[in-house]
Image (cartoon, rainbow, N blue to C red):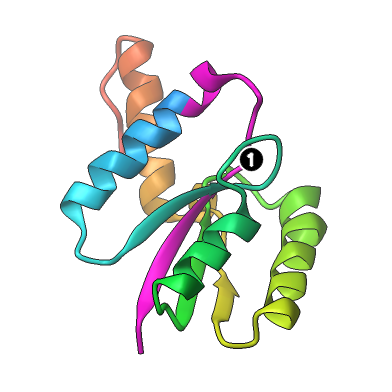
């Protein structure tokens, strides 16, 4: 079964806001063998809808959506699951799964703590 990973960011009409996400996706694409796409929930392209359509055209049968959010607020509790449900109904040929946001992963918390400690002039403590 053909698989892909979709990194999902919120989105912004400001291209400067999108630049770090695009650099991150490029770095991951070079690092991973898993097909990877960056999509935005709103305000930016490629949208989640257009990304799923592109993956279907490429023959992908299963995609996991990894939200690049710190926490699961309203967007991840209601809006994005609604988008995924609508996409699943529209495109029954692809199985979509919404993963927990990266901000809830222990490794993300440790990496963020290290960055904050460095900015504060201290070393991170485990």
What range of the chain is rendered magenta? 1-18
State whether residue 74 is above or below residue 123. Answer: below
Residue depicted at x 55% and y 45%: 46
Residue 99 lies left or right of residue 72; in this view the side is: left
Q: How many marks?
A: 1
Few, some or many C-alpha atoms within 10 Å of disc 1 (few <14, some 14-19, many ≥20)?
some
**Quadrant for the C terminus in the image:** top left
Q: Position of residue 87 (x, y in %)?
A: 70, 71
Residue 18 appears in the rendering:
yes
Residue 99 appears in the rendering:
no
Q: Residue furthest top?
A: 121
Q: Position of residue 57 (x, y in %)?
A: 46, 72
Q: Position of residue 62 (x, y in %)?
A: 47, 80
Residue depicted at x 53% and y 21%: 15
Residue 104 lies left or right of residue 11; in this view the side is: left
Residue depicted at x 38% and y 11%: 120
List the residue tagged with mark 1.
10
Residue 31 lies left or right of residue 26; in this view the side is: left
For label 1, the SS is loop
**Quadrant for the N terminus in the image:** bottom left
Q: Please say whether residue 16 is one of the residues in the magenta stretch.
A: yes
Q: Position of residue 12 (x, y in %)?
A: 65, 28
State whether residue 53 is above or below residue 7. Answer: below
State whether residue 97 is above or below residue 120. Answer: below
Residue 77 lies left or right of residue 94; in this view the side is: right
Q: What is the quadrant of residue 34 in the picture?
A: bottom left
Q: Please say whether residue 76 is one of the residues in the magenta stretch.
A: no
Task: Name the one closer to the observer, 92 or 34.
Answer: 92
Residue depicted at x 40% and y 79%: 59
């Amino acid at each position: 079964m053909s698989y892909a990973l979709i990194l999902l960011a919120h989105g912004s009409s400001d291209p400067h806001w999108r630049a770090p996400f695009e650099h991150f996706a490029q770095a991951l694409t070079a690092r991973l063998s898993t097909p990877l796409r960056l999509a935005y929930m709103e305000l930016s392209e490629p949208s989640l809808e257009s990304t799923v359509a592109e993956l279907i055209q490429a023959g992908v049968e299963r995609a996991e959506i990894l939200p690049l959010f710190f926490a699961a607020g309203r967007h991840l509790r209601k809006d994005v699951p609604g988008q995924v449900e609508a996409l699943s109904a529209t495109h029954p040929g692809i199985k979509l799964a919404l993963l927990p946001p990266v901000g809830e992963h222990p490794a993300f918390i440790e990496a963020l703590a290290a960055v904050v400690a460095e900015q504060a002039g201290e070393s991170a403590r485990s």
